[in-house]
Amino acid sequence: MFARWRFVVLTQLKTTSDHIHNIFNVPQAVSETHELIKEGKLLEAHRNLSELEHTRDELLMQLYHGDDAYVDKNTSLHHYYEELIGLSGNLGQSLWMIMNSATLLVTENPTKVVTALRIIEREERIDTMLVETLDLKGIPPSQIPGRPKKWRSKCIEMLETSISNKFESLETTSEQRIENKDWLMEHLSEVARTCYMDLQAITTAGVQCFPPSYDIAAFFIKRYHRGLIEVICQLIDMGLNARDIITLMIWIGDIKTSFAETLGVDLQSVGPLMKTDVETDLLKTCHGQVESNVRELMGNMVKTEQEEWNSQQPPECDVKGKYYTPVGINLFQIIDQNIQALAPLGLPTKMKVLKICLGALDEFQRKYRNALDGYYKDAVAGRIEPPCCVLYIIAIANSCRSCVEFTEQLKKRMCMELNESTLDKEFETGFKSVAEEFDKIGLHCCDILVDVLFTDLKKVLGGLMTRDAWFSQPMVLVGTVEGTILDFNGDFSKLKPAYHTYVIVQCQQRVIESYLLALCSKRMVLKKDKEREKAAEYIVDESRKMSAMFLRLSHACNPRYTQLIEMMAEVIKSKQEYLPLDISSLANKHREVNEGHVVALLAMRGDMSKAQVTKMLQSTVLGKTEEEEEGEGARPGRRREEKNILAQISVKNHWGLLK
């Protein structure tokens, strides 16, 4: 027992003797080390600290060696070396300051980072060796103050804290969000810039400073990925509008692409920045707001158009001199802007927005047509007196025609972007429906224009085939009709070609209809041969005059009606013995001619009784049954399926016209 005690004492004395210089030099060494830390000479400071801690640790291990629980000098020894705890903490603070600025220092002063990491790694090795030694000697690690230091873990913790602090510093305030409408874009730009600069520094310079065991690039990528997720979640929790959702989702796509292309950092490999269900909910919110905004804008556009229709000034003309309103351009700008705004979110989103816009167009068209009808009805009823009513209806028609063209252009563009010759059936049907409805509204405008014109001509056309207004002053009524049409055509020429052609053709048909109706209405009786000849001459001249005018206005006008009227005039002036031949020729050439029309013409002649007409018709093609007619073979020009102007004129109680 005595021998063992004597051995322990001698060992302790020897250890003390070996470190006698360091033992008596502790106060001075501590002071010098503090100065070295202040001066930034961290390696020298760590060397001093390591020597002091080594001496202390050796003494403490000797003190606690074996089962000498009776030793009571531990209190004074701990007290003597207690300044080392503060000194170590002071050095550690310097290291943590460096680690806190690691992303900046790896490029600006990499030596500092390398020095700090060398110290940290040395301390890590000291920790390991000391723990192993204590374990061999059976001494609890808790008996050595400040050990193990675990500075590598603290280094990692400090790096994580610095990253967290960096993201916290990027957070926006409610005041900033209220005062700056572009706050989100600026905020996301700052986040992206910060992440990019830091990851660029770490992936290029940082990997040269940190030991491979740190796998520092992967560490930073994971932490910044986590930080980006937190930023995104915070923004979503704020409740973003459609514009902000689009901005955020485009930004997510951009940041993944740019980081991969310029830094070689694949954020997606770490994990998605946004969960699928969250993305789905955001897109639903975005789609709903886009639809609401588009419908609201289109609704406001109808109101703006209505205000413009009552303007004292005529509508604007395009480069070809055609009237137009801005509705077509504005309408498809809205559609294009929304499609392009969401296009970066992917093809499914783009097609969803297209579907929304096509649906909104359907609602717009209903409102637009209702507004047009209300405008015209109010003008006719005198509730409003728009000075340029006709001109604006022309402009509306042209705008509708432009919308048809814009619809086709949009469809072609979508096909090109999809690299397809046609779209899905749903979209093909949607585009077709939109184009057809705009064309219907445009044609409806044209019909209104024709109605306006023939409202002015109503009294004039009512005088056709009357003795006082027509027979006594030949060509006057037709001259008035021609002058009125040419006058209106001054405005109609401002229509786009397709609609101008339609209007002129409709005018021709309305004039022909009025003329044929007058011929079949027995407005006067021509009992004398000379009167019948003169009337027939007037009819032929007027028919040719009107035909020439309409053909000048549009080559689409049908000269066939001139031939029809001339053949009807021939029936009026023909001798009775030639009537069966003339009537058969008329009926063969124009299948729409029926018994009622012929009886009305004969009633206008006034030279035949009902019995005579009945007998005569039996000898014409009109008196034959279908079986008889078919037995003789088909006659040229007879097409039962054809429906034209005369076919729509029904002579009621035609036998009652004969007396």
Image (cartoon, helix red, strand yellow):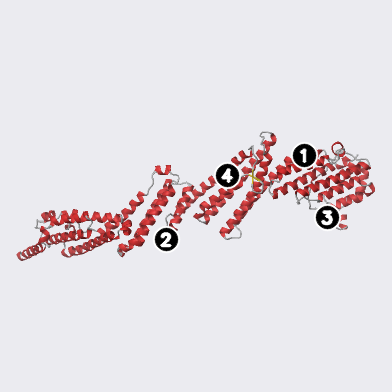
Q: Residues within 10 Å of mark 2 (few under 14, many from 20)?
A: few
Q: CA distance from mark 3 to mark 1?
A: 33 Å
Label located before the other in sequence (2 or 4)? 2
Identify the residue under disc 1: 457
Which residue type carries mark 1? Leu
Looking at the figure, which quarter contains the N terminus? bottom left
Q: CA distance from mark 2 to mark 4?
A: 42 Å
* Residue 407 appears in the picture as rendered: yes
Residue type beneath disc 4: Met
The disc, 2 or 3, on the residue closer to the chain's N-terminal end is 2
Camera-side residue: 36 or 561?
36
Secondary element at tag 4: helix
Helix, strand or loop at disc 3? Answer: loop
| Residue 623, visible in the rendered structure | no
Q: Residue at x 51, y 51 (%)?
A: 341
Image mark for residue 298: 4
User: Mark 2 or mark 4: which is in front?
Assistant: 2
Tag of residue 637 = 3
Give me the C-alpha separation between circle 1 and circle 4. 38 Å
